[in-house]
């Protein structure tokens, strides 16, 4: 349910937020503005990667939680019925798969690719097919909001 609600909110503002980010990366009052790097939170990655591609600029992810599978911890925000279960790798793997399926279902139900391809067209980029975000995330440099000094590394 959370992913469906979040995706609905995301898609309702996709075009205006994506356009504002494009403007922030390309416009300045002095006319000498150059974007050196694009830093994106989880939801902004969807269009941040497109902006980075159009500007030939590096893009870095900023995340407060790991969104890739880790057997050492359950997905962030997942409630585990019994605390001892959070230390069992196979259970964490299953919980990540369940979260991934919820995310994909929410994204597909709202046809996010249609919005993304519309934005890419505005930038002069070709349409995408498949899950480009997942492909890009596999090599996307990422700054996580945790460390041994703040929160144990998963």
Image: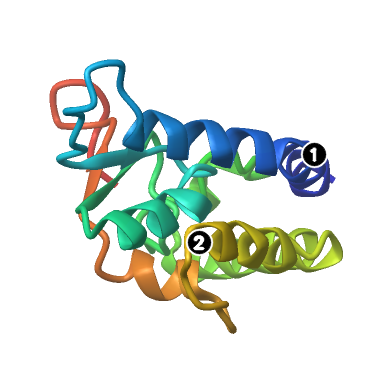
**51 left or right of 118?**
left
Within 10 Å of disc 1 (Cα), the crowding (few <14, some 14-19, many 20+) is few
Relative depth, front residue between 67 and 13: 13
Q: Residue 84 placed where, x, y %? A: 50, 47
Is label 2 or label 1 in front?
Answer: 1
Question: Image check: 91 left or right of 81?
Answer: left
Relative horizontal placement of residue 110, taking residue 60 as reference (left or right): right
| In the depicted structure, whether residue 74 falls above or below residue 21 | below
**Identity of the residue drawn at 42% across and 64% down:** 69
Vertical comparison of 89 with 149: above or below: below
Q: Which residue is mark 2?
A: 92
**Residue that sits furthest to the bottom in the current view:** 129
In this rendering, is residue 135 above or below 54?
A: below
Q: Give the colour scheme of this rendering.
A: rainbow
In this rendering, does residue 133 appear at all? yes
Total marks drawn? 2
Is label 2 in contact with label 1 (beta carbons under 8 Å)?
no
Of label 2 and label 1, which has the lower sequence position? Answer: 1
Q: Which residue is mark 1?
A: 12
> Is 106 on the left-hand or right-hand side of 121?
right
Q: Picture coordinates of residue 130 (x, y %)? A: 58, 83
Res 24 label: none
Residue 132 image point, x, y percent: 48, 74
Mark 2 residue element: helix
Within 10 Å of disc 2 (Cα), the crowding (few <14, some 14-19, many 20+) is many
Q: Can residue 74 be seen by looking at this rendering?
A: no
Residue drawn at point x = 39 percent, y = 57 percent = 49
Q: Residue at x 27, y 61 (%)?
A: 140
Gap in angstroms between the C-alphas marked 2 and 1 = 32 Å
Q: Horizontal and vertical percent for residue 32?
A: 16, 28
Q: Residue at x 80, y 39 (%)?
A: 12
Q: Secondary structure at mark 1?
A: helix
């Amino acid at each position: 349910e959370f992913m469906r609600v979040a995706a609905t909110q995301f898609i309702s503002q996709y075009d205006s937020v994506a356009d504002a980010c494009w403007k922030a990366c390309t416009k300045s009052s002095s006319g000498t503005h150059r974007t050196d790097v694009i830093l994106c939170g989880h939801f902004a990655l969807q269009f941040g990667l497109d902006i980075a591609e159009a500007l030939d600029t590096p893009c870095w992810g900023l995340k407060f939680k790991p969104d890739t599978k880790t057997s050492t911890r359950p997905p962030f925000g997942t409630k585990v019925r019994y605390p001892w279960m959070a230390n069992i790798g196979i259970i964490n793997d299953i919980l990540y798969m369940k979260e991934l399926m919820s995310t994909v279902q929410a994204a597909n139900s709202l046809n996010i690719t249609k919005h993304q391809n519309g934005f890419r067209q505005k930038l002069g980029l070709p349409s995408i097919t498949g899950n480009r975000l997942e492909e890009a995330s596999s090599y996307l440099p990422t700054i996580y909001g945790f460390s041994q000094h703040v929160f144990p590394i998963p």
